[in-house]
Amino acid sequence: MSEEYDVIVVGSAFAGAVAAKTAAEKGLKVLLLERSTEPGEKIVSGGILTHDAFSEPGLEFIKEAPLERELKGVKWIMCNENGEAPLDLTFRSTDGSRVGYTIYCYDFCKWLTQLAVDAGAEFRNNTTVVDVIKKDGSVRGVVTEKGEKINSKVVIAADGGKSLIGIKAGVRRKLPPENVENCVVLDFTIPEREIRRLGLSDTFEVYWGTLTPADIGSYVWIFPYKESFHLGVGALVSSRKSPTIFMERFLHSNLWKDRFEDIVKFRSWMWNTVPLWSALDREEKMLEETYGNGVLIAGDAGGFLDSFTCAGFYGSMVSGMLAGETAAEAISKDDVSEQGLSIYEEKYKKRLIWRLMQRPWRRDVIAGIGGEKIIQLSSNISNYVIRAGFDQPKPSDLMLLFGGFLPILRYIGPFLNRKLPMLFNELMLIMGVAK
Amino acid sequence: MSYKKLEGTTWTPGGEFIKIDPEICTGCKDCVKVCPGGVISMVNEKAKATKYENCCECASCWFVCTIGAIRFSWPKGGTGRKYRWG
């Protein structure tokens, strides 16, 4: 008979490591399982650990985390299908309290896992969980690939967007292709002075336009790190297109060649899928619950991410923490049934993550009718400016172009940024990097 | 630029973890199209995962196959794709 644990956590990344840490701190006997050798080395990230995480009660400890570069603004670059981009808009945080930090998953998750171990959790790597043990309709442990059965009172599935264990537990289902985006990400090193010269020292870049057609539901982005950056682009699986098509297109455009090609060193090519929307939309009935008898689902597996940006670091950590708390409370009351674990839902609905999960889906915003128009408009403007042969539109030119709305923004953007911090905040809201 | 060996991306074999049932597969090639690594190829007009060395375990093939011909699991513990700067 295998040893019994209070809690088994499947997956030692942002959600799982925090869940294990929290449960161990509450005095539970915790086993943290990771399918890879080092935590975080299976994860592809595109993004930012938003400031939301730093102000979340209970997550204060992440101030000590290995952070890369603080970002305070975003540059929207409007480009056409050839990757020509004469227009851009930069929006910068006026009080320095917005956006967040880039992080590397390997460094961060290794650090998080050490915290869980220091709190008393037992960590086991190189262990793939293939199934759950079920008794009387309740999850009572896990089965590893070697056939080992390990019993526990509660299983926390923190196994990422595919959540094979959440599915085996019967709590959630596989997402449809419309709700999955495959993101290809390249990592490059670049000297710090070049980051500054390119205006990337505290700003990330987003490339809008027909370079990335609306049906793929995504855009090209660049997130700067200390002396490196991530370049990425996604494509909805339902588009039946590989995101590498658009990555190649970008790499062949002057946007890449003129600014980056000669000064960077290529060191990693990777891709992975992200769930694109909140898993908790009951009306959609895609994924009914985030908990069941003897099981809790945290992180990407439970849909705890910003529905628009897919930013998931914060949601994963807060849901992991709440799953750990829930397990401790339910075990102390000796009720790990679905009813006993339902306090999980009450807990996360009180947190900011719940609001982020209610935001409009990126799929509908970009791949929808409105998105197509915006992307086309952005491209039209770029083409117009290229044909007209000017960099900065003159007032007389503006009248020719959709009433001049977007070029005017470029003219008055810096002024508005200074005078109206609200504008920045609104944009950050749309971009999903602020409260 | 194409897929190649890089210091930040490593791979070790971890078994055949993408199983495609030829009885269910209709040969629509959707899984071939969505796969960034060209892992899946057509054998006798049915999809088959062959180039595991290019697989990043994204499961796009599994997601796109809504008729359930593809069974996706994980490679053996400690194997498969790893990233230093993910």
Image (tube, rainbow, N blue to C red):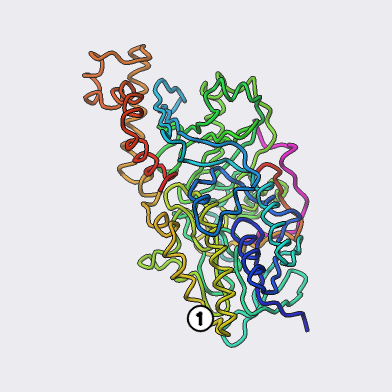
Q: Main secondary structure of the magenta part?
A: loop
Q: Residue at x 43, y 44 (%)?
A: A217
Query: Which chain does the residue under circle 1 lie in?
Result: A
Image location (x, y in percent) of residue B37: 64, 44
Instruction: State whether residue A414 is above or below residue A362.
Output: above
Identify the image quadrant of residue A384.
top left
Res A13 visible = yes
User: In the rendered view of the protein, which quadrant contains the N terminus of chain A?
Assistant: bottom right
Say which residue appears at 32% left-offset and 20% top-offset: A411
Describe the element under mark 1 as helix, strand or loop: helix
Is residue B22 something that shows in the picture?
no
Can you tell which quarter of the image residue A232 is in?
A: top right
Q: Position of residue A322 (x, y in %)?
A: 53, 66
Residue A109 coordinates in the image, percent (x, y): 66, 52
| A241 sits to left or right of A152 | left
Kind of residue indicated by mark 1: Gly
A418 in magenta: no
User: Height in image: A223 above or below A391?
Assistant: below
- Residue found 73% across the figure and 61% down from its top: A118
Residue A114 versus residue A186: which sits nearer the camera? A114
Identify the residue under disc 1.
A340
Nearer to me, A46 or B58: A46
Q: Nearer the viewer, residue A224 or A363?
A: A224
Whether residue A66 sits left or right of residue B26 in the image: it is right
Give the extent of the magenta segment. B1-20
Q: Is residue A423 left or right of residue A289?
A: left
